[in-house]
Image (cartoon, rainbow, N blue to C red):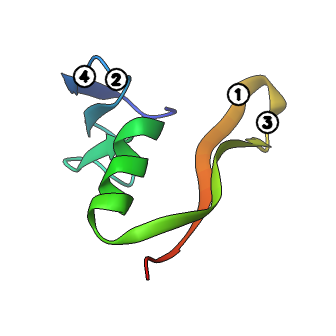
Amino acid sequence: MQHAHEVIERDPDGSYSVRYLEGPKAGMTVHFWAARELDGAMTAAGFAPVLALRPQATWRDRRASGLWLQWEGIYGRAA
């Protein structure tokens, strides 16, 4: 994360929530999902995986700032 923040929640599955203290999201709380949590939420909502979750990485504009990592998957409505 590039802007000042505080971690307000951390779960054993690897997910966590932060409240941004500076930047365009100042005052906002953002949740970062763990793969198991995201997959469980999707299947509980009636969706089935078409393409399993996988990490997707993109280099930031300034490579020294590291990578942007996010989960990517495809889900369809379960029959």
Q: Nearer the viewer, mark 3 or mark 2?
A: 2
Relative vertical location of residue 17 with respect to residue 79 in this rendering, above or below: above
Q: Please tell me whether mark 4 sits on a helix, a strand or a loop.
A: loop
Q: Earlier in the sequence, mark 3 or mark 4?
A: 4
Residue beneath label 1, please? 65
What amino acid does circle 4 point to?
Answer: Asp
Q: Earlier in the sequence, mark 3 or mark 2?
A: 2
Q: Among all residues in the image, which is located at the extreme front? A: 79
Q: Nearer the viewer, mark 2 or mark 1?
A: 2
Residue found 24% across the figure and 22% down from its top: 11
Residue beneath label 4, please? 11
Q: Quadrant of the C terminus?
A: bottom left
State yes or no: discs 2 and 4 in contact (Cβ < 8 Å). yes
Q: Residues within 10 Å of mark 3 (few under 14, many from 20)?
A: few
Distance between mark 3 and mark 1 Cα atoms: 6 Å
Residue beneath label 2, please? 13
Return the x and y of residue 75 as percentages of the image width and height.
54, 69
What amino acid does circle 2 point to?
Answer: Asp
Residue found 48% across the figure and 66% down from its top: 48
Position of residue 30 in the picture relative to residue 66 (left or right): left
Residue found 38% across the figure and 41% down from its top: 33
Relative vertical location of residue 34 with respect to residue 75 in this rendering, above or below: above
Q: Residues within 10 Å of mark 4 (few under 14, many from 20)?
A: few
Residue found 34% across the figure and 23% down from its top: 13
Residue beneath label 3, please? 62
Return the x and y of residue 68 as percentages of the image width and height.
66, 40
